[in-house]
Image (cartoon, rainbow, N blue to C red):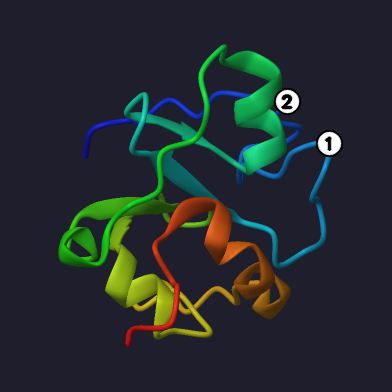
């Protein structure tokens, strides 16, 4: 299995960062704008000099989520429809859904 680098202010081997570090804050997101994994939008903004580009709805089958527990990549659909990693059953933080708009096109469709 290839090792994927997680950028930002990571504080442990499950990709928690200084901004979000509860037991369930174990995912990193591949940012569409720079093709790099970061634990959160705050880490991205601290390390990059460009605005965040969100993943469009047509791209939700892209592998853009990294489980920090088992290091498996998930598609955006898999992540958004799961409370746990489908590969290792580690729990995801349900509060992350309030930040989806930073990463994914979640605007209501007409």
The answer, for residue 13, to whether it is visible in the render is: yes
Q: Quadrant of the C terminus?
A: bottom left
Which residue is rendered at x = 52% and y = 27% of the image? 51
Q: Return the residue at label 1.
A: 18
Q: Return the residue at label 2.
A: 9
On the picture, is 99 further left or further right than 23? Answer: left
> Vertically, is 2 above or below 89?
above
Provide residue 93's location: percent of width, then percent of height.
67, 72
> Judging from the image, what secondary structure is the residue with disc 1 in?
loop
The answer, for residue 87, to whether it is visible in the render is: no
Query: Tag count in the figure?
Result: 2
Provide residue 81's location: percent of width, then percent of height.
39, 85
On the picture, is 36 further left or further right than 68? Answer: left
Which residue is rendered at x = 53% and y = 85% of the image? 83
> To which quarter of the image does residue 31 belong?
top left
Provide residue 88's location: percent of width, then percent of height.
42, 72
> To which quarter of the image does residue 95 belong?
bottom right
Provide residue 22's location: percent of width, then percent of height.
82, 60
> Judging from the image, what secondary structure is the residue with disc 2 in?
loop
């Amino acid at each position: 299995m290839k090792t994927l680098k997680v950028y930002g202010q990571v504080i442990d081997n499950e990709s928690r960062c200084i901004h979000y570090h509860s037991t369930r804050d174990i995912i990193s997101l591949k940012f569409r704008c720079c093709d790099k994994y970061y634990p959160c939008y705050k880490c991205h903004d601290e390390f990059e000099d460009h605005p965040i580009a969100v993943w469009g709805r047509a791209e939700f089958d892209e592998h853009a989520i990294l489980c920090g527990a088992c290091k498996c990549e998930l598609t955006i659909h898999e992540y958004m429809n799961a409370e746990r990693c489908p590969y290792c059953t580690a729990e995801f933080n349900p509060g992350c859904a309030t930040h989806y708009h930073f990463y994914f096109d979640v605007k209501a469709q007409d």
